[in-house]
Image (spheres, coloured by chain):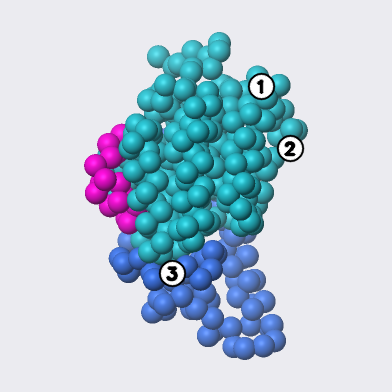
C-alpha cells in the first residue's frame, strides 16, 4: 500500500532505511527541522543543516522513488538562548524559497520556559508573514499536557487558522483538546515513549479518523522507520478495512499537506475514493 | 468524540493480546523487585517509583480511560511558563507532583 510518513528525520537514518521504506510502500516523506542530539555551536551549523534538508536529502530519497519535503525552524531544545535563536530564525526566509520546503516546523516547546515561548511566538509570526503552515512539536512526557495547551493558546492568540497547523506527538491526554480546537493531530509511533502502534489504533477507534495521521518520527534515538506500515498491520490484525490505513496515511496527509503549494501528489499515486 | 469502536469482540481481543500484556505486567513486577534488591537509597523515595505505584490502582478501578488518566497523573498541571529551562530532558513524571 502506498503511504506517506509525514514526520521522519532522515538525516539520522541510513540509505538502507530509504530502501526498506520504499519496499514497504513509502512514496513521500516530510522531514521537520529538529534537535540533532547535541546543541549546535553556531548559526552556521544550522545553515549547513538547512542545506542538507533542502539539497542532500531530496537526492537520497529520489534514488528510491520517494518524494522528500521538509519544514524549517529552530527547534525548541535550542531555543532557550533568544539571541542565538533569532540568528537562526533569520536564516529561514532564504531557505523557504527551496522547492521542497513545505512550511515552518517543528516549532513548539520543550521544557515550557519563558524563552522557549517567546521564540515560539516569533516563529509563529514568521509563518504568518510568509503565509506558511505550521508543524508543532509538543514536549515529552510530563511536560506534554502543559506545553500542548500553551502552544495552542499562542497559536490562537496570533490568529492562526488551526486547520493549517498540525500538532504532533499527541497522546491520549492531549488528542481530544487538539481536535476539539480545530487543529490537525499527529501520532508518533515510538517503542518506549509516545504511542505504540496498538495505542495509535486505539486512539483512532476512540477519536475518529478525521484530521489525524501517524508518523514514525524516526531519528537518532530508539525509533523505527517502518513503524507506519507496522501500524497498518495492527489495523488489519483487528479487522479494520484497508481503507482505514489509506485514509490515515495517504488521504489525510495529502489533504493537509496540499495546503502548501510546494506539495505535489506523488507520481502514480491515486487517492482512495 | 465519535462512538468508540473496535472490530474485535472482547473474547477475540483477549485472545489476541493477553500473552503480550501478561508479559508486560510481569516486567513491571520484576522491575519493582529489581529496584528493591538494588543497593543505595530507598527506592520508595524516588518520585518516579512513587508515581508508578500511584498509577497501578488505575488499572483495576473499573473507570475506563486508563491511559488518559495515567498520563494526566504523570503530567505537570501548572499553567505558567517556567522562568528558564535548566535541562533539556524529561523524567517521565512531574518532579513536583504529589505522589
* Mark 1 nearby-residue class (10 Å; few <14, some 14–19, many ≥20): some
Name chain A's colour: cyan
Of pointers 1 and 2, the one earlier in the residue sequence: 2
Along the horizontal axis of the image, is A213 left or right of A211?
A: right
Q: Residues within 10 Å of mark 3 (few under 14, many from 20)?
A: some
> From what the image shows, is residue A16 above or below residue A66?
below
User: Which chain is tinted blue?
Assistant: B
Q: CA distance from mark 3 to mark 1?
A: 42 Å
* In the depicted structure, whether residue A262 falls above or below residue A169: above
Q: Which residues are magenta?
A: A148-163
> Where is mark 2, residue-wise?
A14
Q: Secondary structure at mark 2?
A: loop
* Image position, residue B9 (x, y; %): 43, 40
Q: Residue at image x 62%, y 23%?
A: A66
Q: Taking A123 as reference, is A195 left or right?
A: right
Q: Chain of mark 3?
A: B
A231 or B61: which is nearer to us? A231
Residue B84 shows which numbered tag?
A: 3
Amino acid at each position: 500500500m502506498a503511504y506517506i510518513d509525514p514526520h521522519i528525520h532522515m538525516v539520522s537514518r541510513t540509505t538502507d532505511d530509504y530502501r526498506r521504506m520504499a519496499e514497504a510502500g513509502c512514496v513521500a516523506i516530510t522531514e521537520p527541522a529538529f534537535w540533532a542530539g547535541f546543541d549546535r555551536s553556531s548559526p552556521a551549523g544550522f545553515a549547513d543543516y538547512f542545506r542538507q534538508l533542502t539539497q542532500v536529502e531530496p537526492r537520497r530519497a529520489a534514488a528510491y522513488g520517494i518524494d522528500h519535503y521538509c519544514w524549517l525552524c529552530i527547534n525548541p531544545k535550542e531555543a532557550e538562548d533568544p539571541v542565538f535563536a533569532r540568528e537562526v530564525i533569520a536564516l529561514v526566509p532564504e531557505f523557504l524559497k527551496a522547492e521542497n520546503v513545505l512550511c515552518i516546523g517543528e516549532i513548539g516547546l520543550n521544557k515550557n520556559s519563558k524563552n522557549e515561548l517567546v521564540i515560539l511566538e516569533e516563529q509563529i509570526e514568521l509563518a504568518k508573514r510568509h503565509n506558511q503552515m505550521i508543524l508543532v512539536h509538543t514536549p515529552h512526557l510530563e511536560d506534554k499536557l502543559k506545553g500542548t495547551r500553551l502552544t495552542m493558546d499562542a497559536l490562537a492568540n496570533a490568529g492562526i487558522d488551526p486547520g493549517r497547523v498540525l500538532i504532533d506527538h499527541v497522546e491520549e491526554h492531549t488528542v481530544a483538546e487538539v481536535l476539539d480546537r480545530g487543529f490537525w493531530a499527529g501520532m508518533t509511533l515510538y517503542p518506549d515513549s509516545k504511542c505504540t502502534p496498538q495505542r495509535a489504533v486505539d486512539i483512532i477507534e476512540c477519536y475518529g479518523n478525521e484530521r489525524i495521521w501517524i508518523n514514525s518520527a524516526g531519528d537518532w534515538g530508539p525509533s523505527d522507520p517502518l513503524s507506519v506500515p507496522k501500524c497498518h498491520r495492527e489495523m488489519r490484525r483487528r479487522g479494520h478495512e484497508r481503507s482505514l490505513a489509506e485514509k490515515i496515511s495517504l488521504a489525510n496527509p495529502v489533504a493537509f499537506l496540499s495546503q502548501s503549494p510546494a506539495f505535489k501528489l506523488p507520481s502514480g499515486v491515486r487517492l482512495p475514493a | 468524540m465519535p462512538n468508540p469502536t473496535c472490530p474485535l469482540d472482547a473474547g477475540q481481543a483477549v485472545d489476541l493480546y493477553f500473552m503480550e500484556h501478561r508479559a508486560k505486567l510481569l516486567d513491571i513486577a520484576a522491575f519493582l523487585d529489581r529496584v528493591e534488591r538494588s543497593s543505595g537509597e530507598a527506592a520508595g523515595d524516588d518520585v518516579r517509583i512513587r508515581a508508578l505505584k500511584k498509577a497501578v490502582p488505575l488499572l483495576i478501578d473499573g473507570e475506563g480511560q486508563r491511559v488518559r488518566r495515567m498520563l494526566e497523573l504523570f503530567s505537570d498541571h501548572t499553567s505558567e511558563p517556567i522562568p528558564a529551562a535548566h535541562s533539556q530532558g524529561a523524567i517521565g513524571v512531574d518532579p513536583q507532583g504529589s505522589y
